[in-house]
Image (cartoon, helix red, strand yellow):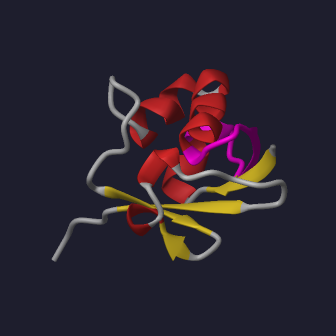
Amino acid sequence: MAITIHLPGILARLADGQQALAADGETVGGAVADVASRYPRLGARLRDERGNPYPFVTYYLNDEDLRFRGGFAAAVRDGDEVTVVPAIAGG
């Protein structure tokens, strides 16, 4: 399934500056794994060593919080969009 993963600028620099990446997979986790295989430095920022999402990175599947859609196990369809939002610290 072809989907699009949207990255914020801070992560896009780890994907050759691309803020939108085409990805294949049957689930969000599969699509993230596809992107991680092509951009290993980015992959390390998207998921932990076991392939699970970090608690400080929020994913949205078509504008719905992925935590309420089954996490990385959520099924995707052609044309779906995943948006990645890392936590921002500061004060």
Viewer-proximal residue, 37 or 18?
37
Q: Residues in magenta?
A: 14-28
Classify residue 24 as left or right of residue 72: right
Q: Quadrant of residue 8?
A: bottom right
Find residue 39 and report its horizontal and vertical position in percent.
61, 28
Left or right: 4 as drawn, with respect to 13: right
For residue 29, side relative to residue 85 (left or right): right
Residue at 70% from the left image edge and 37% from the top image edge:
25
The residue sitting at 37% across, 44% down in the picture is: 53
Give the residue displayed 69% in from the left and 38% down from the top.
16
User: Relative to 61, does residue 63 appear above or below in the rendering?
Assistant: below
Question: Looking at the image, which is closer to me, 1 or 89?
Answer: 1
For residue 62, which quarter of the picture? bottom right
Count up the numbered dots.
0
Q: Position of residue 60 (x, y in %)?
A: 53, 66
List the single residue furthest toward the left: 91
Residue at 33% from the left image edge and 23% from the top image edge: 49
Q: Would you say residue 15 sits in the magenta stretch?
A: yes
Judge whether 67 appears above or below 44 on screen.
below
- Image coordinates of residue 30 in percent, x first then y, are 61, 35
The image quadrant where one finds the N terminus is top right
Quadrant the C terminus occupies:
bottom left
Q: Is residue 52 left or right of residue 8?
A: left
- Residue 20 placement (x, y as % from top left): 73, 54
Does the magenta portion include 26? Answer: yes
